[in-house]
Image: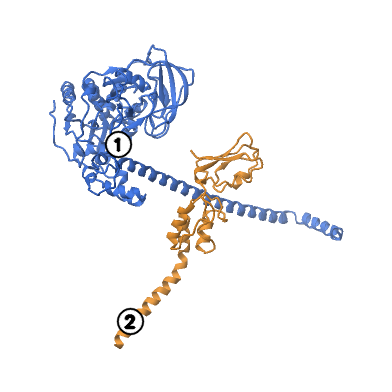
Amino acid sequence: MWIAIAVISLIALVAGLALAAAARRLPASADALVDEVNELLPQTQCAQCGYPGCRPYAAAIVAGEADINLCPPGGEETVQRLAGLLGREAPALAVPATDMKQRVAVVDEALCIGCTHCRNACPVDAILGAHQYMHTVIADECTGCELCLAPCPVDCIRMEAAR
Amino acid sequence: MSAPTYDLGKLHGGLRLPSEKEKSTAQAIREVPLPAQLVLPLAQHAGEPAQPVVGIGERVLKGQLIADSDGVISAPVHASSSGRVVAIEPWPVSRRRGDKAPCIVIECDGEDRAVERAGDLPPYTELAPEDLQLLILQGGIVGLGGAVFPTAQKLMQAVTAPLDHLILNGVECEPYISCDDMLMREYAMDVLRGGQVLMHALGIDSCYVVLESDKPEALRAIGEALAALDDERLVLKQVPTIYPSGGEDQLVQLVTNREVPSGGLPSDVGCVVQNVGTAAAAHRWVNHGEPLISRVTTVTGDGVADPCNVLARIGTTLADVVAVAGGYTERAATMVIGGPMCGKSVSNDRVPLVKATNCVLVMSAAPANGREMPCIRCGECAAVCPVQLLPQQLFWHACADNEIKLREYGLTDCIECGCCDLVCPSHIPLTADFRKAKGRMRELADEKARAERARQRFEERNARLRREKLEREQELAAQKREALESAPEAIQDMLRRAQQQKPDGEDD
């Protein structure tokens, strides 16, 4: 009987050490987890979650600072997928979903005064223009995040359905 | 003359369908009279639309280049007759319901004057294969079997692999369509000479001309032309009449017993398949200088009075084409471009005939198909699937929108032949469901690619902003250091003065 107890204790000890080693290794993979979470986000970089872009939001989710239901362009689907990845309950979306992925910004070129404010606000460098020259949106690269609308002093940017 | 041979591979599944071709093959090809106006879409081929090279109001001659190829996969468009360009604008086309696409509209002057050629054409045999491929590109030649893939690009792609055979596809397996049959009966020599041209462009010495056994007249015509041509590189082959043996991959399998790999091309197994109409068009361009400006089209179905095959100029409206076939009957209800299996319905007969239009099918009201019922997992669909897929499983996963499983079960290999629909005892429109699922898969892939690009741009922008900030700081620090080093007295002087003025400043 003592032999059995000794063997089982030994196995428990080895397993315990292995788990401890694994636990020490785990924090190193947090970055990989951020990447995985980032992968599920829609990459509109719209900052509606309160973080300056999708990756910062992903980092906040992994760090436990943000809930997973803050992404309006991702919608319920993204919440579900994030819940699946992180093994959590899927909460309801905190804000109504938007269809910004299907829209692009369009600069009314007759009104644009070339102030560069929208260009500097664009998170994906999809606005082209120089100081005092007309600006334009590269429609293929626009994520529809609407971050260029607010800084425009003459309100010459509107959102249109992407082709 | 080479005798028809039967040393064939096996095709999985397939169906024997009623051919319904007798009516339209009873008479010779009729020519459609020159219309008053031609509408030539810029996108008549797979790939990028052509770019117009003529302006509104310009006079053009028959065969003149009016839109040039633009992009890696594209083909030019030529004027089908002489006249004046009156518009370049979106116009209803037959691609999708209510769809408009940019077209060049030509008002014909009725003279039908062709472009004059400077001197004689050099014989193509003097050209290097690469130059011949480029020449074929300039003729606007595209695959006339229905997929309208630009022929030159197909040849250029194919020669990158070691090749054995050119296969001229005269297997018109879909019911009702008979344009290739009639073309081979009346222009057999053009088809064979086209085969020679394409062989030269590919740099190979073997060409199979493949026909179905239900076309005895075309077989005879091709056989006689082969005897007259006396070129042993060309061999006539006959295949049994089973739908869809005219599919590209299916035909390669039948003729050479080699299976085209999933996601691959016939060139992966050393074959290039070209439609017989394409070969004839290549011959007319390379040997006679006539670009692809007309084609043979079948006008048939119980909705037209006098089903027949017509030789129509590209850009003629379908209404004019149907008029040549005796016009509509009272029963005419639906119009389909292409055959009943793979064709697409159109709602309007003012759309132009394009390079892809192999058949105009006018039918009475579609026979009631029976109500769609739940799948009973009988497996009939798997037995007839020529690509050896499992449609019942695909249907299951398509309903669940399970992209990963759909990929695993090879949805991308589905050729949308419609065999599974026909045999389904529950009348499930499987092909339509698969088409939808494929569209959804493409959409998802697009979205993913876009998100990935946005992520990259976002990260690169952040990196740029960090870099710029760092550079600015370094620049400032460097300037400060430089100023301190170059003129310490001046700075000391300035600081002293500031110090002296300070007491005043501190007061308020």
**Residue A114 % position (x, y):** 64, 39
Q: Secondary structure at mark 1?
A: helix
Q: Eyeballing the image, is B449 above or below B41? A: below
Find the distance from the CA under tag 2 to the CA under tag 1.
Answer: 66 Å
Rendering colour (chain A): orange
The residue at which mark 2 appears reads as: A8
- Judged left or right of residue B222, residue B326 is right
Label 2 neighbourhood size at 10 Å, few (<14), some (14-19), many (20+)? Answer: few
Which residue is at 42% across, 29% downward?
A: B50
Circle 1 residue: B158
| SS assignment at label 2 | helix
Q: Quadrant of residue A126?
A: top right
Viewport quadrant of the N terminus of chain B: top left
Query: Residue A76: x and y, percent?
Result: 47, 53
Give, as a three-letter code, the residue at label 1.
Ala
From the viewer's perspective, is residue B135 above or below residue B34? Answer: below
Which sits in the foreground, B328 or A84? B328
Parent chain of label 1: B
Q: Position of residue B17 (x, y in %)?
A: 21, 34
Nearer the observer, disc 2 or disc 1?
Answer: 2
Name the amino acid type tagged 2.
Ile
User: Residue furthest toward the bottom?
Assistant: A2
Residue found at the far top of this picture: B111
User: Where B312 falls versus A93 (above or below)?
Assistant: above
Residue at the spot x=35%, y=82% of the render?
Answer: A9
Tell me if I can see residue B196 in this picture.
no
Tell me if mark 1 has few (under 14), some (14-19) or many (20+) residues whose alpha carbon lies within 10 angstroms of its own.
Answer: many
- Residue B110 is marked as none
Residue A66 image-quadrant placement: bottom right
